[in-house]
Amino acid sequence: MAPPRLQLTNITKRYPAVVANSNVSLTVQPGEAHAVLGENGAGKSTLMKIIYGSVKPDEGTVLFNGQPVHIRNPQEARALGISMVFQHFSLFDTLTVAENVWLGLDKSLSLAEVTQRITAKASAYGLDIDPSRPVHTLAVGEMQRVEIIRALLTNPKLLILDEPTSVLTPQAVEKLFVVLNQLVSEGCSILYISHKLHEIRALCTACTVLRGGTVTGVCNPAEETNASLSRLMIGAEPPALQHRAVQTGATVLKVQALQLAREDQFGVELESISLQVKAGEVVGIAGVSGNGQRELLYALSGEDTRCDASMVQVMGQPVGKLGPQQRRTLGLHFVPEERLGRGAVPTLGLAHNLMLTRTDAITSSGWIKLGVLQTQAQSIIDRFKVKTGGPNAVAKSLSGGNLQKFIVGREIDAKPKLLIVSQPTWGVDVGASAQIRGEILALRDAGCAVLVVSEELDELFEICDRLHVIAKGRLSPSVARTDATVAQIGEWMSGLWNAANVPAEAAHAQA
């Protein structure tokens, strides 16, 4: 019999504030899709980085194809045949897609050859991307496509995927799974991290469960249910959401005939976008990444003030020319899709990151009330169960899901009148996802107007009262969640909506 593709024995990694991995052992066979399951902060990403050579273990051994290895860096990992798609992307913003991919490939290839290979892979796997685009012009979902294509181009023997579908549409996930199943059939091994339990059950035939940095179970996920996997991972099933019908109030956000030219050749032009969000409702916007979500969110948050003042109104006031801080004084709070860099300053502590959107700890003379910041940050940490070393822990030290909980918690804790949130549960475990979604519904029930932009249809159907779809810079009519179907929304994602297939309820809601 062939030796295991990967065998970890008693891997331990300590940091000053936490033991990320403690005596972790894991075996992956050739041609096996193996899931690593655990809640945010369980040590999954640290373990994957050890395998990929970007983090060095303090103790333990690693065997690859039966041979002991000491992987000192990602270049050595790639030479062995190990590729990884990170949850937090490792791309250079100022370089093009092709140049980013070229950096990780055999230097005997020319940039033109790499560009051709990217185009071929993108076409074969349905991961649409333009090799000539600078990375800084891409939306999060498009960046994830780049990472996946870059990994696939190395023809890996072991492919590590850390939340690869978190911002992909259901159609794109189906195409990716066809690719992954084909790779497995050809002998490639896959290590798969995801909080989407139905994906793990569909793709993987083995699963190692981590809790608090230690292995708490090994199973075949195909023989488990979502409920039993949840119990293995977090010790309980997430609570069911209570979605009650409420009476909506006054219109809080009104966007009318919003027109915005693209800022560069790779942007998306917004065409006559109109929508309303009333107090006491959650309105969702679905769509494939790169269809104008970024441009629309910038216009709503105040980061782009090029539109006419009256095109965006908050609480009846024209705000199209106002910046983010001025809009916050009217009660608009915003959660961007990029956690590090826009949602939080990576090198600042959580308490100081509050000052990005909260000014109540700053005196009129400009002094910072550090005690107030610490207390506020600790309150958010406790309320949203953020796993961290405390309010002074720097943002980049948190796992992706825990940082997301803190950022969403920071804006919800501000008691907004209008909350605009992009990808609210990206990379967040099932328990925390249920908590965030429950907090959003509680905010709605308290009379807040909520606009959610997400590429997770399950999420939108779970928390929204009405749904729109954005495609090629155009916004569909709204449709009541109770009248919408996944098939219909998927069809609208291609821009295929017209008067013939818009339900009467949708036309009435839009009016």
Image (tube, helix red, strand yellow):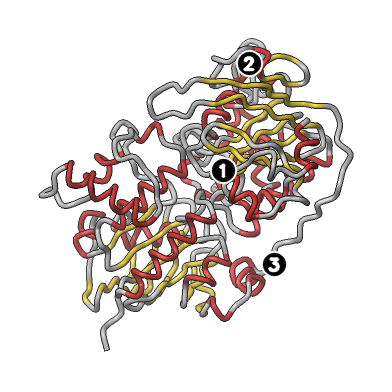
User: Horizontally, is 106 left or right of 359 in the view?
Assistant: left
Badge 3 amino acid: Glu
Badge 2 amino acid: Gly
Please give the residue where the numbered disc 3 appears in the rendered image: 237
Viewer-nearest of discs 1 and 2: 1
Badge 1 amino acid: Gly
Q: Residue furthest top?
A: 365
Frontmost residue, 217 versus 169? 169
Q: Position of residue 169 (x, y in %)?
A: 53, 51
Q: Position of residue 405 (x, y in %)?
A: 61, 46
- Whether 7 is drawn above or below 284: the answer is below
For the point 77% across and 56% down, which residue is it?
Answer: 241
Q: CA distance from mark 3 to mark 2?
A: 44 Å
Q: Quadrant of residue 317?
A: top right
Please give the residue where the numbered disc 1 appears in the rendered image: 287
Please give the residue where the numbered disc 2 appears in the rendered image: 320
Label 3: which secondary element? loop
For the point 51% across and 79% down, which residue is it?
Answer: 220
